[in-house]
Amino acid sequence: MSTPEIPSPTATPGAPAGPVTSPAAEAGAFLERAEERLHHLSKRASRAAWVQQTYITEETEIIAAEYAQELMAASLETAIEARRFDGLSLPPEQSRKLMLLKLSEALPGPADPARLAELAEQAAWLEGSYGRAKYSPPGRQPMDLDALERVMGRSRNPAELREAWAGWHGIGGPLRDGYQRLVELGNEGARTVGFPDMGLLWRSSYDVSPEAFEAQLDDLWAELKPLYQSLHAYVRTRLNRHYGEEVVPARGPLPAHLLGNMWAQEWQQILPLVAPAGGTPGYDLTERLQHAGYDPVRMMRTGEAFFSSIGFEPLPQTFWERSMLTRPADREVVCHASAWSLDGDLDLRIKMCTQVTGEDFQTVHHELGHIYYDRAYRHQPLLFRGGANDGFHEAIGDAVALSVTPEYLVRLGLIDRAPDASSDIGLLLARALEKVVFVPFALAVDRWRWGVFSGKIAPSEYNAAWWEIRREYQGIVPPMERSEEDFDAGAKYHIPAHVPYARYFIAAFLQYQFHRSLTEIAGVPGPLHRRSIHGSVAAGRRLEAMLELGASRPWPETLEVLTGSRKMEASGILEYYAPLKAWLDVQNEGQLVGW
Ligand code: X8Z
Ligand code: ZN
């Protein structure tokens, strides 16, 4: 790969005499221009993307692709130009901005305009196709993802679950060729900005070498794995008892369609099947929310009120006017929840097809975490308007949602009294089915993608590798024979939408570190899982102090502001679930652990 000729910022001998400037002054001027240009273009691209995702048509797809292309071209140009400052000694703030400039695009475009246009179109088509996708059962109405997810969560009929699972996974196949092309062109873009492939570009965003980053993830996973395996073994025993040896063998991996979620990424919906007698949390949040007459706006308002209780300003009125909080009846939209900052300032919005369920109550807090983060760092220069790393962004709302304890639900009037400590195992089991179970899934998704991007996984093995990796990390298998006609990874939003996933893995650990520190600052005693920071302005202030920094410093420094530690640690999540682990070990006595 040839590198374009790049002029040196230092004066060339023999060049006509001009104003003598220092590298720092040149870099400063360059960065100012780059930030202004990218800010302008990303505002336009965000607006077009918002319209496309909330109103999918051929035209909106084309318009969004055009603006995305414009932004990609500018990002590429500035990233290449930024190389002329490589190796120069500059103030740390400038070096950091230059680094972030090169890493800013998860989907870097090739230099050739025709291929860049093709990539932008491909990306918009893939995301649009996922958004539009439906399963058409023979002789019945087509089912969208919401409807299929309801079946996955609620049905206990293996045949019905198989059908819903296969129905949705069938949407992946038609995306396979487009995805392969996206990988080729995106990799070309990565090489243009100096990375061997997109996976290495993604893994270079964490203030350490990509190798060191991978090692950090492996270490975190190694620490959590025993807890996950205990949970897996326990669930297998209970499902074996419920469905019988034919459907769920007592040894070996679990069938992916019986775990209460389309992607088997969170299993809390099968709690009633696996909870021991008397070991449920004592209330069902979905039922309580529905009984209390909550609707999507009230769910969001309740989330906002939590943030207000810890001292954050209410959301701007435009948030309520411009957000899309329910699935519109009259048009196709990308329903996967997301938080948007359209202008890098106060035009903040959430797009979410909210359902009144405990699961979506969690997602509401998750999305609000993004929004408050975006707002807190809006005074930073453009290149620093981002999470300390992308895992921080994903962890904020989840950390706050860890404070949605039974005691807090009593304050909301959703339950009459908090269950006593005898319900703790039920509470922890419910949470672990959601959050501990998610961790190996999150790692599997990007382990697969890193392999695909590097070429280690060839297109002819996309699907086989997807299931090999999921079996290895999660101990699950598909409910039926799959082939390379299928593209099951494509049935998960973040693959066609090209959203990196390691961020959620990191967040799964960080949120407990944040929660532990925040509850300490709030002075709340008791075991981690019973503590809530609701109402603690002291905790809110410290949180905001971290959020305001955005991406302006290496993340270990930012982490230190809140937690005093410079490392991502498994100790928080392990402490949180320690009572559950002890209990699971007793339940699993005499059973095989592992698969
Ligand atoms: O995609 C999301 C959020 C938006 S950043 C709704 N999440 C991941 C997923 O749904 O797969 C949150 C948890 C994991
Ligand atoms: Zn998120």
Image (cartoon, grey):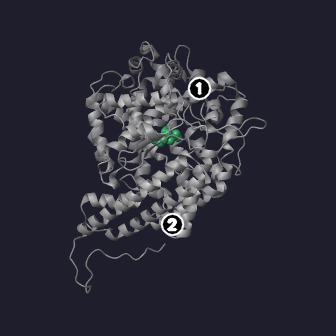
**SS assignment at label 1:** helix
For this rendering, which residue is in front, 441 or 395?
Answer: 395
Q: Which numbered disc, 1 or 2, marks the residue that appears first in the sequence?
A: 2
Residue 540: give x, y in percent of width and height.
29, 33
Q: Residue furthest right?
A: 139
- Residue type, label 1: Ile
For this rendering, which residue is in front, 479 or 189?
Answer: 189
Q: How many marks?
A: 2
Q: Which residue is mark 2?
A: 110
Is the C-beta separation of discs 1 and 2 under 8 Å? no
Left/right of residue 510 with respect to residue 594 in the rendered view: left
Q: Quadrant of residue 256?
A: top right
Q: Residue furthest bottom?
A: 14
Q: In the image, what residue occupies the spot 52% across and 62% down? A: 187
Residue 139: give x, y in percent of width and height.
79, 36
For this rendering, which residue is in front, 363 or 254?
Answer: 363
Q: Marks 1 and 2, how far apart in space?
A: 45 Å
Left/right of residue 415 with respect to residue 239 in the rendered view: left
The quadrant in which the C terminus is found is top right
Q: Is residue 383 visible?
A: yes
Q: Is residue 508 visible?
A: no
Query: Is the distance from the Cβ of mark 1 to the nearest ligand 1 atom less than 8 Å?
Result: no
- Label 1 or label 2, whichever lies nearer to me, is 2
Q: Is residue 270 above or below residue 27?
A: above
Q: Which residue is mark 1?
A: 270
Q: In the image, what residue occupies the spot 49% across and 46% down? A: 501
**SS assignment at label 2:** loop
Left/right of residue 377 with respect to residue 361 in the rendered view: left
Left/right of residue 86 with respect to residue 500 in the rendered view: left
Residue 324: give x, y in percent of width and height.
50, 39
